[in-house]
Amino acid sequence: MAGHSHWAGIKHKKGIADKKRGKLFGKLSRAIIVAARHGGGDPDVNLTLRYAIDRAKKDSMPKENIERAVKKGCGESSSEQFIEITYEGYGPGGVAVICVVLTENRNRTASEVRKIFEVCGGNLGSSGCVAWMFEPKGFFLIPSQHTDEETLYEIALEADAADVKLFGDVFEVTCAPDTFQMVSKALTDAKVPTDVAEISPIPASTVDLDVATGKKVLNLIEMLEDQDDVQSVTSNFNIPDNVMEEVSSRL
């Protein structure tokens, strides 16, 4: 879990989402459109849509953009027929990488994702080559300044969360996918803000990276996330805090 939290935390500290706000909103809209198209426009019934909308709100996507995407997803047939594909591969240092995309052109996206892996010193693998190293879980990242461990532990465990851990200046809360909404509601009701709230593949173990390899892995993940069709990227790397300081200075 530490590898996952490192990347989630790094993104927030570097302001990557803010720098690419327009592109981020496009990705969020696409996820909402697909969810609404497949399960209807009512987030109380369509949990996939609710999750997509919650994620959009967390990233400050305007309400009118969200509503427009839902309406588009519920509209008549569109020329944009997106499909979800999961790519798996290995990055520098042998880290495992899972990349989820929504695309209307499978061949183009596969070619672009493969090229990114190769340019960054990794390689795209076959389906299932690294998925066995991960387990889908609800994941929340909470800055420690907003709560204390005892209070958070009580809130999370009462909502059937599986674990609460402190890593540096952030808490990680994990839960089973089917209790994600319950835990999310409990945190919201308790007015505990989250930097990250998502259902994501969480690695069973992590690979520690040195400065040189850490820089290469972060570059790979940033390039993947910058690709228009990519919705999420997860890896099993871990960069110790002392190494991260040096890596950050070189980015």
Image (tube, rainbow, N blue to C red):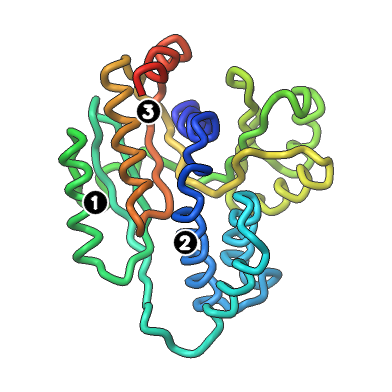
Tag 2 secondary structure: helix
- Left or right, 212 with reference to 27: left
| Label 3 residue SS | strand
Give the alpha-carbon distance from disc 2 to disc 3, as whole Å.
27 Å
Q: Nearer the viewer, mark 2 or mark 3?
A: 2
Kind of residue sitting beneath label 2? Gly
Q: Given the image, on which type of amino acid does mark 1 rest?
A: Val
Discs 1/2, front: 2
Q: Quick one: which residue is furthest to the top in this view?
A: 242
Q: Residue sitting at 22 percent across and 44 percent down? A: 116
- Earlier sequence position, callout 2 versus callout 3: 2
Q: Amino acid at mark 3?
A: Phe
Q: What residue would you read off at disc 2?
A: 26
Image position, residue 23 (x, y; %)? 44, 55
Quadrant in the rendering for residue 123: top left
At x 76%, y 50%, the residue is 185
Q: Point out residue 250 in the picture as x, y percentages from the top left corner.
A: 34, 18
Q: Is residue 1 visible?
A: no
